[in-house]
Each structure stands twice: as structure tokens, then as C-alpha cells.
Amino acid sequence: MQNSNTIETQNNKVLVVGGGLGGIRTALDLAEADKDVVLVDKDFTIGGLMTQLDRTFPTNNCDLCTIAPHLSESNRQEHIELMTMTSVENVAGEKGNFSVTLKTKPRFINLDKCTACGECFKQFPEFVRFSPGLDHRAPTCMRYPQATPQAFSIDLDKCTDVKALVDVCPAGAINPDDMPIIREIKCAAIVLSPGASLFDPTPLDYLGYATLPDVVTSLEYERILSASGPTSGKLVCPSNGRQPKKVAWIQCIGSRGLQKGAGAYCSNACCMFALKEAIVTKERFQEDIETTIFYMDMRTFGKDYELYLNRAINEYGVRFLRSRPHSILQKDGEDDLTMTYTMDDSTKQFEEKFDMVVLSTGFKTSDESRLLAAKMGVELNSDFFPVTVGLNPVVTSKPGVYVAGTFESPKDIPETMVQASAAACMAGADLPKYDKKPAEESEGVRERDISLEEPKVGVFICDCGENIGGVIDVEKLVEHAAKLPYVAIAKAEGHGCSRLSMANIRQTIEEEQLNRVVIGGCSPRTHLTKFQDLLGKAGLNKYLVEIANIRDQATWVHSGKPDEATAKAKDLIKMAVGSAVKAQPLTDQSLPMNKNVLVVGGGVTGMTTALQLAEQGFQIYLAEKSDKLGGLAKQLIKTLEGDDVQAFVGDLITKVQNHPKIQIFTRAMIVDHSGMPGMFKTGMQSGPQMFYRQLEHGVTILATGALSNRPALYLLDQSAAVRTQLETQKYIHDNPQAVKNWENVVMIQCVGSRTAENPNCSRICCQNAIKNALAILEINPEVRIFVLYRDMRTYGFQEEYYQKARSKGVIFVRYDVDSPPSVKAAGAQVDVTYFDVILGMKITVTADNLSLSTGMIADIDSTEELAMIFKLPRTNDGYFLEDHVKLRPVDMSVPGFFVAGTAHSPKLIRESVTQANAVAARAQTMLAREIINLGAASARVDSNLCAACLICVRACPFDVPFINADGYSEIDPAKCHGCGVCVAECPAKAIQLMQFEDDRILAQVEQLFERINA
Amino acid sequence: MITAERKPLEELIEYIKPFKRILLLGCNECVTVCAAGGRKEVGLLASGLQMAMLKNGSNIEIRQHTLERQCDPEYVEELVPMIDSADAVMSMACGCGVQQVAMRFKDKPVFPAVNTTFMGASERQGVWAERCQGCGNCLLGLTGGICPIARCAKQLMNGPCGGSTGGKCEISNDVDCAWQLIWDRLKALGLQDRYLDIIPAKDWRSGGGSGPRKIIREDLAE
Amino acid sequence: MEKFEPVIVAFCCHYCAYTAADMAGSLRLPYPSNIKIIRVPCSGKVDAQHIVTAFEKGADGVFVAGCLEGDCHFKSGNARAARRVEFVKKYLEEIGIESERLEMVNMSAGMGHRFAQVATEITQKIRNLGPSPVRTTMAQ
Amino acid sequence: MKTESRLEKVLAAGHLAVTSECGPPRGTNFDEVVRKSKYLEGIVDAVNVTDNQTAMVRMSSLAASIIIKQQGLNPLFQVTCRDRNRLAMQADILGAYAFGIDTMLCLSGDHTKFGDHPMAMNVHDIDSIQMIQMVKDMRDKGLFQGGADIKGPPKMFIGAAANPFADPFELRVMRLAKKIAAGADFIQTQCIFNVDKFEKWMEGVREKGLHKKCYILAGVTPCKSLGAARYMANRVPGMDVPQEIVDRMASVPKEKQAEEGLTICVETIERLKKIEGVAGFHIMAIEWEEKVEEICERAGLLPRPQV
């Protein structure tokens, strides 16, 4: 790209600012929905914060493997233009027609040529940057191996000998004359997800972060644990390199207004973050290490997060201290750290020694992003987070500009992903409707029929610059390859993946009429798709290519031993040829897409989704179990933030009822279901006569909601003075006079939640209590309100309402799960007796009103029935279980199914609305397609061999195989995940996994040992 | 289903030592289902024998073939074209299959590769348990659908012996007391008094007591 | 006879072990060239037959590498693989091949170091064991 | 009177009967049998002669019974279903009766697993209840099970075993009823340590009036040592030795344990005497025959009545 100011005219695209996980998700959702995206990131590679994490809660998965596909995916999408090292200079225009000036810093490296061979980095590490950007304490040459783009960048100012630098690059990719590029683009909408930075504890000298090397932030600890981190995964104290015996975490650093410069909000993710680090630490070192978490409230309010907390306590023996740390210091002549702290139930000061202390630092908006907001004309709140409109947290004060992720407010990865998708949905809706470009296959070349041909293999070997060529003699390799059976031609191909070479290979395939191709180069993980596309263009079935990974598996790891490297490369190529010879053309499974949508559940979530998708022109069937729309929200009056829920719901209902594209079924009951993703058939009975009809639809969205819990505890339904928070709210609203006469009000938290029967946290109750407490005080400032709680879980900005309630005199008293409060009837009132930890005595309050925070429980009956009919997984407590807790929070494991709102887990309205929009976006990625491509890697049963033994049926991790009417095992390619477990277990050898057929695997084995046997 | 288990390799090697060319047979019925002698096991055994023989210094040639059902002569006919190129046959089918092959090819030594164990049902993936002994005169109607012949260590037909403890058989804690099961069933069905009828001494003729058994369906038999 | 160099087949699952091997590459972590990787979608795809055949053809060692326990991208494939490896180990003993020649290992995609380390350790172990009995007899 | 059996006479006369047992030697030693039986002479009404007890090969119970008969005692000929098919059983019964052996006990027999021939086939051609029926028909109808006439049918006094302590407990009384219905004249029970549980069982027995339809001899065993008590408590299937018995054995020094064992045994008998429906005692002093006399003495069961 040359340095001229190119002026864009089209405004039919979305600008996404920030290439972190959220930005990538937004971009992918839009792109997969056939919408154009410009994704800009100021960094050298995309990936953001998550690429620095070792493992993530609550699955303790390794992130590299989970995030990598997403990154390369985003690189491939033809709808996405990726601009790294780029920042927003200026914004003009309005929703639907913005023009944005972007500035790209010079990388001094031509991305088209660079192969990330690393030569330049080897020679001039001091000024060549390979995806850098780690925090100062965790330097590592590589942030993660799947960096996108796979390219270096150069800090030319530091460069002393430019000539030498330029010459060192075998690909001639270094361009010292590279200039900053100013570019103006037009777009219809903008999504901001630049993320947030983390609180810097340096100024807090009493924590010793600046002076004591063994005091680290949670992210730094993460780097130390990470396999790709500075210590390559060895846990050691930075000061002395010894493995710590005692590690402590201090929560709420930079959050809840606790320290100078801290945000007044709760940073939302730190509790789980610390839990995870403690658990992973325990997992790895068990008895050898002691882990302690110093905290005020454990805020594990997310889906199944409470279980995670219980595991930390019961299984891993992580120690929890409800306390306020006072200072950390290192006494003279001691290596270890001394922490002084006070417990919340006494004023006594304690001292304890630790080898390492981890500060759970919270989120903070960065100056850059504040600047960005200013440029965008986005209004910020007192915490410098964007003010969002009404009940939709991704909508800013500036029409056409949307926000997602930690830039919007502190949050963890799943919520970031949800918001990212929601933002994609909102932004996508702003795009002008335009005719879809012709689908790819039309431009693709017609495929050559090779069924009658002898295998004719072409072997192309990359030197990948020094990477391969520098270690082994590629020409020798070519000679050897040429002699292999079925090989018609073998060539050296320089940088095989460079545009030039790709063209050569394509030409050779066509001229020589090759019918199999073997590439000797790098990893199929990163490059297979690239070469598959190439074959397609050359008129060959894309599954006829095989890659021998002679770079990552030979030259890179045996560089010191050229002979061995050569010998191994020969073997790898021989194996690849053997496998390629057996390769057969495969057709991707594909189905025509039915573009109708079935939305189950007519609450806020269901209606919101329905509306969004209807607006995009899709036919919606909205099925509601009860006789009217609105769901649980009908019982709500105001949100904590003061939005009028009834007005909102009423408006939503009218819109839905009047929308031509939405067909509503009330008293609807799903009775049967069949078909596959993109072409479902669902039977439903609805209306007073339970009239049956079958709907055809391509996508199913579950928004069946949850129930408000009502356990028979604390005289609920026995004394008139006892109400649920829901009822309290209504009562306050309807009887202000009565409220005026109240003297004492008590609220009990976690009623029927966080118990043995219902172990999870209901998430909404703490803010409910605060909401009602404040409302009561509005009417009757004299009343005394006692809130009996276990942990106050007012996450995010709710924390500020919590503080407000405290300052207004609401009395918060913690009770222990083992000694809950007791309630006795006292005439029209009730006597509530609780044990006050701080006073150390029992106290009885005669309350005019006792509000029970009963929270939510799953609608077990409906979810169970639907789960059975749709064959969907559920959590133990009866909520629908998403496919991937972190990366696919609203997708179900069965393609074509999505879940949103309280059917997923307890939520506030705004959170449900966000998920509803997210689901709309995810659904569009499917609905945009004309056909659904299911890939080719699926298991196939040979019915002539099948003994119907059921072993595959039992072995399949996804319950896909079944014995069909003809008495043979049948595997639906649309449902098969392609793991091959059934293949390996089938006693009749009746199953083969396409692309990984047994004869191909065995061919590799045979080829490998050919030499030995000969 | 008939269940079977592969014989120890040594025993099999002893059988085939004298031979150079082995035809290794599988069966796609019961032994496939109980993972003892299907195509997969045939492949595994072929490799195993190959290697083991190699260690004994002899390089043998093993041809693998799996029949749809080795206990039916028509299927066994399939072997005609390949039988001459083998010095001996080893079959992973149940005893019936092995004999069927032996009967068909009188001049070929035929060896069993599995021990045919019992008629069983699969309890779960990879677990099979004995359920029937083919006594030829089914008692299940009297015993709540649980067979005391196959499942009681003493084949007691009139109730549990003194060794029944905690629902388990005296011979092992892993074995359920058949009579406990029967009793529980009868109670569940409200048929307790069934138990009081004395089941008379069994006529074992139907159970093989009077030599090999045969079933003839006149209408079908030719 | 010149110094014995074993040939070791590594069946690596696409999502974790194979990625870890790539990472060992990009981190330039040397390990013995005796290791030859075969890529499979999931360690659960590795058939007992594949392993046995590898030995039959002359492998001195085999290892199956899957995701960390509980992290299998196909839920439980790695657990099944582990059970299968145990089964084949017993079979190898029957055949007269030391079961130490076969191992199941687990690693996450990030663990380039672990891959290199495992590769080195296993190679060393097989070196000490010497050539597989099958291979020696084949040689004669 | 169905038979000439002394045991039947004693019981019919309403006396508390006493039986004990004598395990044949694991060899050919004739005198060994004689020696053991001498301990019991005049002490008991019948001597159980076990049939390859605990599935260990011993001198055949038929031969040993004959020897004991020749010593002037009354053998109680035991036959299990484990080792013989119905032909062999009937043949032995004829033979036994020919030697004047008129009392027998029909058993299923311990499983071979527990003995010294675990590899042996368990015959179980018929089960114990079917055997009782068979013997009854031989006696009362004079027919072989095959249906043919017997010339001189064996007039056997038919005994069966019952274990009040095995599971399922509720079946235990019904099973007894079944044995009686099949033709059992008397019952010898498993050794009783848990008298309460036995009492519970007897309630059931009395409810059905079974104690009127046949004689129930309560089985007792003296513990030789703490080890023996523990062994019976933990190892022997279908045995119920309450913890307090074990503790009581443990509470005394090793050299006094045998004595304690005898005392417990005697106390047990005393308690059992009080239970309605108990018609006598079967004292199993395995390899301790010499003590049977002392037990009977102390339990006031001597002298034996003349009938």
C-alpha cells in the first residue's frame, strides 16, 4: 500500500475501534452477516488483554487454544479490513454517514512479503518488535504463537544501520521509507471497544508495589503462570527466583473507592480472576503452596461462579480472609513480606508473612479512550465510562456510536463477548440495505473430476527464507521428493505462501494436471485453509492437499543439526505424500438456509430479539407459554438506575404486536422437533384450542426466562409483614402512606440462594435490596433499614448505589450461613433476630416490613421439557447451557440454537436486553447465508459393515449416532463434530472420519518406516 | 448375545507355530458386538501375532477376513477362494463359528482365537454379564423375569441359600444374589405368594442333559 | 552396528498437542529429531490399531498427546485415549514389547516447553531401552 | 411316628433334643472317626456327619455315618446338592438306610469357591428343597424321583437347614415354610449369636404355626478364641455375630477366652430355651467335640432321656 490519502466513498460499513476479544467478536459477527468492517487497533497485533492470560475461569481452559481460531478467522474474513498500529484522528458526520480519519503508524515492514521468519529479530532484537506489548515485568519475545498479523514491526528510530537491517530480510519485506498513512473512511456506524487499562498501584506506597518485587499485580502473576510467559510457566518469586510457599491476593485494589485514585465502582471481574489464579496455583502445587485471599465481599455472581467459589474452598483449600489489609512491608534481613491487616469482626491488628502478594487491580478507563470518546462526541459518566441510553448498555449518547467490553464498564470475558455481539447487532442495523454480492462459488472455478485418474502428486517445498532454507538444502529435498511414488513433479517454491509462489503453484497444478498437492512448509494449522483455497482456484477439490510441517517440526527445532533436520524433513514429506495419495475429493456438507426464526419466550428478551431480527427483514415466530407477552418484567416498576420498566415493556409489546414480520403465538407449547440447523421443523400447540401447527425455521432462540423464587422461609406467606423484594417494590409504590409509618425495615439476602438446594447466586437480589431501601428512604427518611447479607454483590456501578445507601444510614449487617437470622411473628409485625458479628451479640428488631431477597430459580419444568424436545444441555440447576462459557456465551452446542436472558442465568433487564441483541447478531451470522457449510470432517458409516452394536452411539461425546430404521448406525454430518472417537472404537471398522481416514493415517506410518524395512 | 474373550497370545502362538500362512477370521455378529472378534480385533490380533512370531524368528503371512455370520454355511462359502492359500485357519468367532468353518474345510486345521464365555447382556459400554444358560425350559415367568439358573451360583430354584447377605451372593460381593433380585421384583409386582409354590426338580433333558440339542421347524426345514 | 537412533511416532491432537509442537517451533526449542508427528483431530481418534501398526512397522516408541485433562475440545476424547493406551500397553507386554515404549501425555496448546521436554525425555527413555524387538528381528 | 429315628422319638416325646456334629477326617483314618464320636456318646441324640463341609474333600459322609452307627451312636447323615446328581443321592440314601441310618439332613452345600477344589463343577442338579421332596416321596410313596417303585423304601427322618440371619430376612420364614411344605420333619438352624434377631424370626415362624409343623433345633457354637469369633463375624457368609460378643471375647485375656466362649454358648442355650417353638439344640463344636459334654452339662441338658 503506498502512502497516498485514499478517499472512500462507500458508507456501507462499520468501523470497529479496538482489536481485543470484543472488537474481534463484533467484527466477526458483522462479517459473517455479510457486512463490511474496518477493524483498527493501535497495537502491532490484535488480541488485546486476553492473549496475556494463562487460563481463564471458570473452565480453567488454556486461552491460546480457545482464542487462536478466532484471530486467524478474523484475518481471513474477506469482509474485514484489518488495520493495526492505527488510531482514530478525527470523526465527522452523523449516524449512517460518518467520515473518520485514521492514522496508521509505519511498521517499516511490508505485510504482504513478511513471513515472520524471525531473521531480523534474531539479528537486531533491540529494535525489532515481534508482537510486543507485554507489561514491563514479563518480557517475552512472543506474546503468543498465533499472533495476527504474523509479522514483525520495526522501531526505526532505534535502528543504527538501516542498510544491514534491510539486507537481513530474505523476503525483502523491510521498507525503511515506510511513512505514516492518513486515511479517511466512510462508515454508517462505529463500535468502540478499545478496552480499559488496569489500575496502577505504584502510588500506593503502603502496598510496596513500586519497591517490593514480590508484590505483583494479578496480570503480572498471570504472566508468571503462563506457559508463554517470561518464566515459561515456572512460578517463582521475581526477587529471588524461588518457588513461593505462601501467596496472598488482595482484592479491590483500585475499586470500590478504597484507595486514592480508585474508581468508585466495583471492577466486577477481579474476584473470579483471583479465585482462578489461586485454584490454578493450587492445582499445580497442591500441598506445596498456601493460597490466601484477602477480601471484603466475594462477588461470584456470574453463571455457576458460586460453584467455582465453593470448589476453591472445599476442593482446593484456598483460604479466605474477610479483612482489610493495612500494609505490606519487608522487614530488614527478611526475604518474605509481612502483611498487617484487620478482620471485619474485630479491631485487632494481625500480622502474617507471605512470599508473594498479588494485587487484584481493577479496571480504569485510559486517557486514550477518554480522548477517543471526546472525538466521538460520546458523553462519559463521573467514572469516565460512557453514559449509555435507557436499558440498552451498548447505545451511547451519540447516535450511531456503540460501545462494548470493558470500555463500556468493568466486566469479564463472557459479558464482553455478549456486548460485542450486541453492538454488532445495533451497528449492523444502521447499515443501508444493499444487494448481497454474488456468492463466492460463482466466481470459483469448476472442479475437475479426478475419480479415474492415477494419483499425480506435485510437491512444493518452501525455503521460507532462512527458516527452512537456512538449515537444510531445499534442492536436495526436492530431488528426494521427486523420486517418491506417484510424485509427478517436485519444486522449490521460495516463500510458498507469498502471492507470487501461490500463483506459480496454481499454474503448475493446471499445466501438469496434478491431482494431489503436497506443500513442504509450515503448520497446516495456520496455512491449510490458504492452500485449500488455492486448490479450489486451480480447479482441484480443496481436500486434495496435504502439508508437511518441515519448518515448525524440523528446521526450527533441529536448526543445530542440519543433517537430522534434513533426514526428518524427508520423512515428513514422504509421510505427507503417502497421505495425499490416499486423499479423496470431499464435498463440504451444505444445506439451504431457511431464514425464519423461532423465538421461544415472549418476555423482554424474546421480544427484543424478535424485533431486532424482524427489523432486518426475517420472519419471526414468537411463541409465549402464557396468555400474554411481557414475562417477569411486567412485575417490575423501576430499575436501580431509575428507568421506568412498565413504559419500556409496554412500548416493546406494542412494537412487537404491530410488526408485520412477527407472528405471535400465546399459550404456546412446543411438542415436537426435527430437522437440522438451517432447516428445523418444530411442532407447536397454541391458543385456547391448543391448535397444532408445524413451523419451518432455520434458527431457534430460547428466551424462556426464569421464575422468581418463593421458598417457604422466614414466615413468607404466613405473616403480612413479610414480602419478597418484588412485592416490596410494588407495595412501596402502591402504599406510600403505609410506608411513611414504618419504623423498622429488615431485608434478608440470599434467601433460597447460595444454599445446598440452590447453590448459585441469584445475581439480582443485592441491587434489588439497595433499590428498595433507597425507594423507602425517599418516602420515609426516618425509617431504620437493616440489610442482613452474606456478601454484598453490587458489582460494577451498582457499588455506587450501595455506598449511597450506606451514607443514607442503611445498616448492613453480615450474617453467617451457619447462623442465619430467625423470624417470629409479633402481631402485625415480625421480630427478626440476628447475630451481630461486630457487636458479638444477638439482636432482635421488630420490623414493620421484612423483605426477603429470594432471587430467581430456573423454570425447571419448561427447560427440562424443551431440553428434551430440542436435545439441548442444561446446567445442574436447570438453566440452558451455552456452548462455550467464555467465547460462545449465547450459542448453544447444537448449531442453530441460541439462548438469551434469564433462561441462560439470572440477570437484570439491561443484561437481558444486551443478550437479546447479542443473540440477534449471532443469529444473523447464520441467517445471512444462503446455504450452511458444515465442512467435510464428519464421520461416515458404511452400513454394509455396521453391526449395529451401539458402541458408537455410546461413545459419541455429543450423542450424534443413532441406529436408524434400517438397523444401522447413522451419523448426521450436520451434527457430527468430527472428533473421530466413534471411528476409533467401532469394533466392525464400519466408520471413517473424512479427512482423517484410517488408510491416510496408516499410510503415514507405513511411509515413515519404508526405509527401515527396505 | 454370545460373549467371548480373546485367548492369551501364547496359546494362539502355540497353535499356529507350525504354519506359515494363516487365514484369520472374524465374525460380524455377537463377537463384534462384544468387541472380541470383529474386524477391529482381527486387525489387532493379526498385528500382534505377526510381531510375536517375528520375535520367535518366523515371518508368517496373515490374511484377514471377517464374515457376516460365521455360523451360517452360506457365509462360510465366501472363504472358498482364499482357503487354499492358507495352511491353517484361526477364527475369532464363537465356538459355533469355529466349528462351522472346520466342518466345511475338512483338510484345514482350524483354531479358536477366543474363549466363548456365556450368553449375556451388556450392562454398559464395555461390560457384559451372564443372563442365560439356554436351559431350554424358561423359568423366568415364575421368577419375576430374573433367571436363577444363570444368575444364582448354586442354581437354586426355590429361594436364596444361607449365604445371601446385603443383596450379594456369598461367592463374591460383585455378584448380586439372584434371589434377592427375584424377591424384590416379585414384591414390586405384588406377586410375593408366587414364591411359595415349590418349583419341582428340573427336567434337564431340555438343557442338554440328554445330549446335543437341535431345533427343527418342519415348515422351514428342507 | 552404528549408534542406535530410535524412531518415535507422536500422535498429536490438533487443538492442543499439535499446537504445542508448533509453539515449540516458534520458540525454537530444540528436541530430538527422532520424534515424527502425525496430526489427528483428537487424541480420542487414535485407534489401538494405529499404535500397534506403528510398532509392527518398526517404531521403537509411540506417544499419544492430547489436551490437558478436562480440556478436551471434544469433551472426553483424551480420557478415552488414555484408557486405550493402557489397553494397548497390556497387549504389547503380551506380544513381548516393553510397554514403556508407549505413553499417553497431556498438554495445552500453550505448552511449547512441555512438548519439547516430553519429546526429549521419551526419546532418551527409548534410547536406553534400545531398538524395539520387532525392529531388531526385522533387521535379521 | 414316621420313622424309627431316635431323634424323632425324643422330639415326639416333647424332650429338648440335642444334636452335635462330627466332621469326617481328611484321610482314611477309621479310628479318628471313632475317637471323635466317643466324645458324644450318651451326650447327644444324633451326630451330624458332614458332607464335604465347606467344600473341602473329606471321607464321604455315608462311610463316616456307617462307622458311627457301628459305634452305637445315631448318625445324622448329611447330603449336599453340590457334589452329586439325583441318581447318586438316591443311591446313597438307599445304602445309608440299609445300614440302619434313618435320619438325614438335606443341604444345598457351600459353594466350591470356598473349598480346596474351587475349580470343580457345582452339580446342583436339584436344590435342597427339591431333595427334601425327593426323599419324602421315597419314604412315603416308595417311589424314586424317576417314578419307579422302591423295593423297601428308606424311612428317613428328614431334616433341613435354616439360616434366620441371611438376607432377605422377610424371605427366611417363607423359605422355612417352603421346606416344611416340601417335607422337612425337623430344622437345624445356623449358629445363633444374635438371639434377638433369632427371636424375631421365631415370631414369624409362630405366626405361621410352623413350629407346630416341624421341630426346630436351634444351632449354637462355642467360640474357641477371639480370633474365631472375629472370623465368624467377618468371614463366614450368612453368620451374624454381634459386636458385643466379639467385644466380650476381647475383654478377657487370651488364655481365658476359650472358657468365656463356652460360657457365652451356655448362656445362649439358656436364653433359647425360653423361646416358644425351640425343640432342641444343635451344638456345632467344630474340632472341639470334647467340650460338647461340658456345654450340655452346664446347660442342664444331661442326662439324655431314655426313649
Image: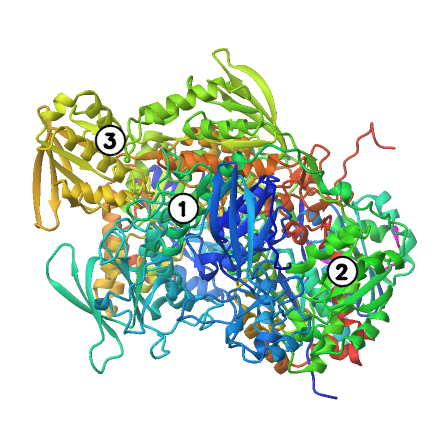
Observer-nearest of C21 and A472? A472
Which residue appears at 40% of the width and 49% of the height?
A: A407
Q: Tell me the kind of residue under disc 3.
A: Gln
| Quarter holding residue D157 | top left
Q: Is residue B123 visible?
A: no
Are labels 1 and 3 on one chain?
Answer: no
Q: CA distance from mark 1 to mark 3?
A: 51 Å
Observer-nearest of A262 and D144? A262
Q: Which residue is mark 1?
A: B166
Residue A604, given in percent of the width and then of the height, sits at 41, 28
Observer-nearest of A231 and D220? A231
- Secondary structure category for the residue under label 1: loop
Label 1 close to label 3 by CB (< 8 Å): no
The chain under label 2 reads A
- Secondary structure category for the residue under label 3: helix
Quadrant location, the N terminus of chain A: bottom right
Q: How is the image coloured?
A: rainbow
Q: Dot 1, how many residues are within 10 Å of its Cα: few (below 14), some (14-19), or many (20+)?
A: some
- Secondary structure category for the residue under label 2: helix
Q: Dot 3, how many residues are within 10 Å of its Cα: few (below 14), some (14-19), or many (20+)?
A: many
Magenta-tinted stretch: B104-117
Q: Which residue is mark 2?
A: A502
Q: Which residue is mark 3?
A: A725
Residue A681, given in percent of the width and then of the height, sits at 61, 27
Label 2 close to label 3 by CB (< 8 Å): no
Q: CA distance from mark 2 to mark 3?
A: 66 Å
The chain under label 3 reads A
Observer-nearest of B108 and A191? A191
Comes first in the chain, label 2 or label 3? 2
Q: Tell me the kind of residue under disc 1.
A: Gly
| Quarter holding residue A198 | bottom left
